[in-house]
Image: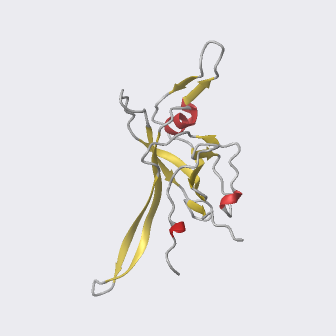
Amino acid sequence: MGVNSKDVFVGAPDQQVTGAILTGPETDVIPETIDDFVYTGLDDSGYVGEDGVTITPTESTESIRDWSLKVIRKVLTEFDATLAWAHLALDEFSLKNYMGDDNVEVTAATATKGTLTRAAIAGEARPTKAWYFKIKDGDRRAVVFVPHGQVTERGEIALLASAAITLPVTLTTYPDTAGKSIYIYLDDGVVSA
C-alpha cells in the first residue's frame, strides 16, 4: 500500500460551534467512535494560544540484566501523560481551569454593568474532569479525549501592553477503569460510494 496524503492531519482547532477544548464531569463511559461524542452540557474553554496543545507521554523503564550484565529486557516502571496549552480567552471557564472551579465567581450582566468576574489564585488542587480536544482539518476530524484529567501545573501570567493575557496550564491524565489515560479518535473524511 502506497503513501496517502489524506492520512496527514493538521492539528487545527474545531471551534465553529463551540471552543476546541471542552470540559465536563469525569467519566468511565468511553465512546466507541468519534460520532458517539455528545458535547451538550459541557463547558467551553474558549480560544487557545497559537502554540496549540501538546501531548507528552512519559515512560520510565528499568533494565533486567543477565549474569553477564547484558540487558535482556526492559520493564515499564512508570507512565505519565500530560497535555499542555495556554488559554487565550480570559473568561469564566478558562479561569476555572486555571484557578479552580471554587475560586471563580461570576455575576451576570445588568442594565448598568457588564458581566463581573472575580477569580482568586490559591494553592489548592483543581478538580478532576473529563476533557475533550476537538480538531478539524477540512473534512477530517479528530477528538483527543481524557476521561480523567486534572490541571496540575500553571504557568506565569504575563501582563503586557503588547500581547494577549494567557493562562498556561498542564493537564495530568489519570487512567480509567480500563487503564487508559488518553484516547484519540479519527475520521479521515473519506466516505465510500
The residue at the point 49 percent across, 51 percent down is 172
Query: Which residue ends up furthest to the top in the rendered image?
Result: 112
Asked if residue 51 shows in the view, the reply is yes
Residue 13: x, y in percent? Answer: 54, 49
Q: How is the image coloured?
A: secondary structure
Residue 4: x, y in percent? Answer: 52, 72
The quarter holding residue 86 reads: top left
Rendered position, 6 above or below 55: below
Comparing 103 with 8, the one in front is: 8
Position of 175 compared to 66: left or right? right
Position of 192 compared to 77: left or right? right
Comparing 12 with 42, the one in front is: 12
Comparing 32 with 88, the one in front is: 88
Position of 60 compared to 114: left or right? left
The residue at the point 71 percent across, 45 percent down is 40
Residue 186: x, y in percent? Answer: 60, 63
Residue 170: x, y in percent? Answer: 45, 47
Asked if residue 100 shows in the view, the reply is no
